[in-house]
Image (spheres, rainbow, N blue to C red):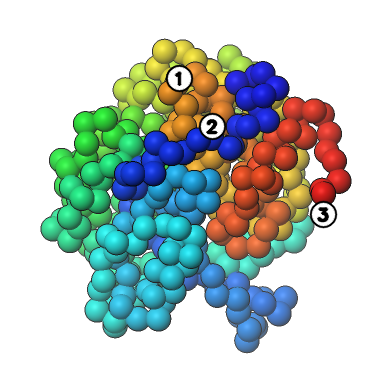
Amino acid sequence: MNTPGKVRDIVHDDLSAFASRGAAFVTLGETMVRDTPADDERLERTRQVSVSLAGSEFTLAVMLARLGVPSAYVTRVPDNPYGWMLRNVAREQGVDTAHFVWAEKTEPIGRFLYELGRTPRRGVGWYQRKYSAASKLGPGMVDWRPALADARLFHTSGITFGLSFHSGYERNHLLEAFQEAMQAKPADCLVGLDFNYRSTLWSPAQCAQVMTPLVTDHVDVLITTIEDMAQIYGMGCGKITAAEIAKGDIGRLKDEDIQAFMRQLMDRFQLQVAGVTIRYPDTHEQHRWESAAMDAQGHFYRSAQVRSIVLKDRLGGGDTWNGGFYYGLLTEGDRAAGLEKGVLVGDAATRLKQTLMYDLPIITKQEIQALIRADLAGGGKRAAR
């Protein structure tokens, strides 16, 4: 992985192994319509909004499809113009929509109202996800065997399983659908999950009640943050306690701190692979970013250094990293090489994405490769025209 030739071609893999197969990557979740003021007004004052699409799992599917990995998205949407918009954008980006579940046209699609901040005012968002069409995607609605027939990685997020609590349902429809999928997936298909705790959807106790057995029993690849694990499980990060993490008193993490944290994840949840993303928000416009990954055999790879990002829109950044990380795992036969490649591609992709407006990672392999090359060379070059 560290030879000049391999670094140069890190995101130009021969993907012919995927060519005769169905979707190698399949993900389950909800996509929302996002409303963002287009006139620099506050949300309560705006009369002009930019309408876009937002959602963890969909962002990830788009990233992998743009990198050349056949990807499919499973969701439930109303049979109306917003549902059609999601289908159309997915198809435009090369994402398979064959397993969309179509609800009555009168059912709501989830919405996300988001107002960008500027230092010292933080960005702020409001969910409108109660009773959404996707929140009621349950067992018997998806034919999982053909959906997962060629899958090498099936992904979802903790957000998905919080939707039932958010809506006050007596049943967790999406959890039941996920369990059904687990019975149908191929034996060699990995299960990945981004923990993605959202306090606006459910309480820490509700989250732990659902997620602990789900991750322990089914998940092979867990992606999370040290903040989520501190809040839900009281986990520290090496010498840094959960209380210090809650206060934001993290500072520069040592390798041994992150490795200790990841070993806790491995032991608690019986994982094959763990990934952690680490964001240092210095101001609303300026963040620093790094990540790390480890597998059950002890292979460990961490970003070579913490990198600065000048933000346009931070939303979708972590999901974009997940896509780049999975790209490494899916395109490398050797697990250690996959971890390194995944961190390199994930870091470059998410840093690029956060210079763009809205959630979707409309970036190219060439841009990712150029940034990786510039990072490794210690600088950048003027883009060729």
Three-letter amino acid code of the residue under disc 2 = Gly
Distance from label 3 to label 2 (Cα)? 29 Å
Q: Is residue 3 left or right of residue 184?
A: right
Q: Point out the residue furthest to the right here.
A: 382
Q: Is residue 102 left or right of residue 251?
A: left
Distance from label 1 to label 3 (Cα)? 37 Å
**Residue 343 higher or lower than 110, as above or below:** above
Q: Earlier in the sequence, mark 1 or mark 3?
A: 1
Residues 370 and 257: in front is: 370
Three-letter amino acid code of the residue under disc 3 = Arg
Determine crowd level at label 1: few under 14, some 14-19, many 20+ residues with C-alpha closer than 10 A: few
Residue at the spot x=39%, y=50% of the render? 71
Quadrant for the N terminus, please: top right
Three-letter amino acid code of the residue under disc 1 = Asp
Quadrant of the rendered structure where residue 194 is? top left
Identify the residue under disc 1.
Answer: 334
Determine crowd level at label 3: few under 14, some 14-19, many 20+ residues with C-alpha closer than 10 A: few
* Residue 368 in view, yes or no: yes
Q: Position of residue 82 (x, y in %)?
A: 41, 77
Identify the residue under disc 3.
Answer: 385
Q: Earlier in the sequence, mark 1 or mark 2?
A: 1
Residues 333 and 231: in front is: 333
Quadrant of the rendered structure where residue 313 is? bottom right
**Residue 212 higher or lower than 79, as above or below:** above
Q: Secondary structure at mark 2?
A: helix
Residue at the spot x=51%, y=25% of the render? 339
Residue at the spot x=83%, y=38% of the render? 380
Q: Position of residue 138 (x, y in %)?
A: 19, 59
